[in-house]
Image: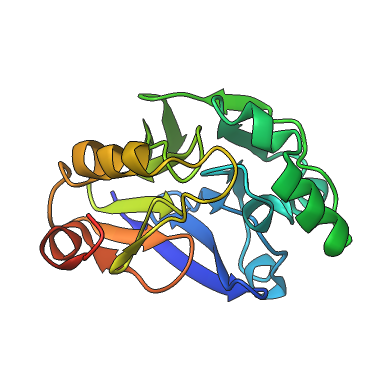
Amino acid sequence: MSLKINCFSMGPLQENTYLITDTATGIQAVIDPGYYVPQAASVITDLRYVLLTHGHYDHYAAAKRYLDKYPQAVFAAPAAETYLLHGGTDNKWMAISHGGEACPEADQLLRDGDVITLGETKLRVIETPGHTEGGICFVTDEEAFTGDTLFRLSVGNTALETGDWETLEHSIRTRLYTLDENIVVYPGHGPATQIGYEKRANPFV
């Protein structure tokens, strides 16, 4: 079981849109479709899922474009993120200022312990609230796609709507730092890192 991971960093906030491909079957998913990336479209061959880690506009802004272009794809989003997915004051301002649209309705609502199957790859859902009230991460035996929960040597902002610092710290310590230290972290912004490195060096947690 292995994944090919393409990361496309776009927009003023350099949001990371990931295209992941199960190498055994070619089945693909997009994680956090913040921007429609022509480079990604050129290598999409069998897109089955569009996945969202949390409800901020810069992570879902291009969801509708991907779903319109690949209607076979299932849009899966966190079940506990209802408020932000349906607007929220910050998101409405960002959408209007960027000429964007509201987040599409999810085909599948994700909860802790759910599993997304991409061929031979299993993406396990773990709930990691704190940056937002309903944020989630997608974890395999080798990778963790952490959205805005955990970055290289940093963590998500908790000053935005539904954010809470103590909840974020608890999520990182009990849900992410308990994972295998060799797992590679693919965050919603910035470069990749590893669980073990963050446990030793991250100054925030």
Q: In this view of the protein, which residue sits in the foreground, 200 or 116?
A: 200
Q: In this view of the protein, which residue sits in the foreground, 42 or 52?
A: 52
Evaluate whether residue 64 shows in this view: no
Q: Is residue 167 left or right of residue 162?
A: left
Residue 71 point in image, percent of width and height? 77, 41
Q: Is residue 186 above or below residue 116?
A: below
Residue 8 point in image, percent of width and height? 56, 72
Residue 178, by quadrant, is top left
Q: At x 77% / y 38%, what residue is drawn?
A: 104
Q: In this view of the protein, which residue sits in the foreground, 102 or 92?
A: 92
Q: At x 21% / y 64%, what residue is drawn?
A: 202
Q: Is residue 102 above or below residue 20?
A: above
Q: Is residue 135 left or right of residue 101?
A: left
Residue 42 point in image, percent of width and height? 67, 71
Q: At x 51% / y 51%, what residue is drawn?
A: 159
Instruction: Say how the picture is coloured.
Output: rainbow
Residue 191 point in image, percent of width and height? 38, 74
Evaluate whether residue 27 shows in this view: yes
